[in-house]
Amino acid sequence: MAVNKCVKYLLFFFNLLFWLSGCLILAVSIYLRVSKGGNQITDQYFPAVNLMIAIGTIIMVLGFLGCCGAYRESRCMLLLFFIFLLIIFILLVAAGIAGAVSQNKMEDWVNKQLKDMLPLSKQPDTVKSDLKNLQKDFKCCGLVNGKTDWSPDPFPESCRCNITNSPTPVPGAECGSEGYYSTPCSTRIINLMKENMVIVLGIAFGIAVLLIFGLAFSMALYCQISKKDGPTTNA
């Protein structure tokens, strides 16, 4: 019995697309890690970039394995490919459900972690410098309670804002009557985490759809090769 060439080449090109998607995810994730990393305060709250690096690497390896299995008509490679895809699909669904359910708990956890850093006067200069840069970029002041988080030290210039110049690159940035940002940085961090969570869940959903097609194609080709070779033929 001949192997259906249509299924074979569909699986091959699917895995080629899968491999290219992994390359793209890995490249973008590495760029984000290199260009946006380096802040001790925010790095620990944005594990999504590290997660995407791992996902991109795994997708590249699986795409290569699937291409080889389809081209060589190897039952062993196709079966391994199917099993790994199934495991990743289950993990993605579980992670997506857990992420969607735990969004409310995330805010409490971040606030607790940031409160543990108070008072800021006891933090090392590197942390203070990172917070000043964060305040400048996010248009915020202090970690949780506003400018009082800097007490007894005076709050830095990065907390100050221009009341007459309302347009800012950060939506919702409020300039207090005394000329400093009234929004604490915890609010900005939590909002950014929620935005990243939506992006990650969207990517996970897209990958899950691709995995379903990969599972169907790989199993169809595996069954056809098994019928062609017979039950006693080695892969």
Image (cartoon, helix red, strand yellow):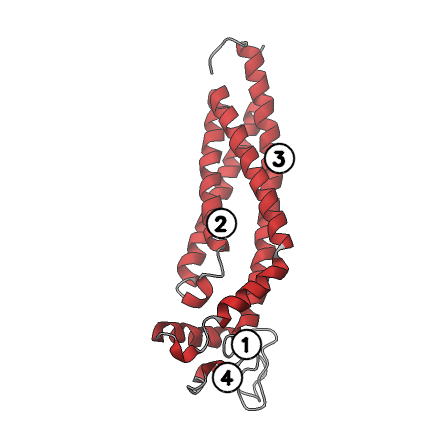
Q: Amino acid at mark 1?
A: Pro
Residue 76 spot, x, y in % from top left: 48, 21
- For disc 4, the marked residue is 148
- For disc 1, the marked residue is 184
Q: Image quadrant of residue 102?
A: bottom right
Observer able to see residue 74: no
Q: Amino acid at mark 2?
A: Met
- The disc, 2 or 4, on the residue closer to the chain's N-terminal end is 2
Q: Nearer the viewer, residue 124 or 231?
A: 124
Marks 1 and 3 close (CB-CB < 8 Å): no
Distance between the alpha carbons at the discs numbered 2 and 1:
28 Å
Marks 1 and 4 close (CB-CB < 8 Å): no
**Between tags 3 and 4, which lies in front?**
4
Callout 1 crowding tier (Cα within 10 Å): few <14, some 14–19, many ≥20: many
Observer able to see residue 27: yes
- The residue lying at 57 percent from left, 33 percent from top is 86
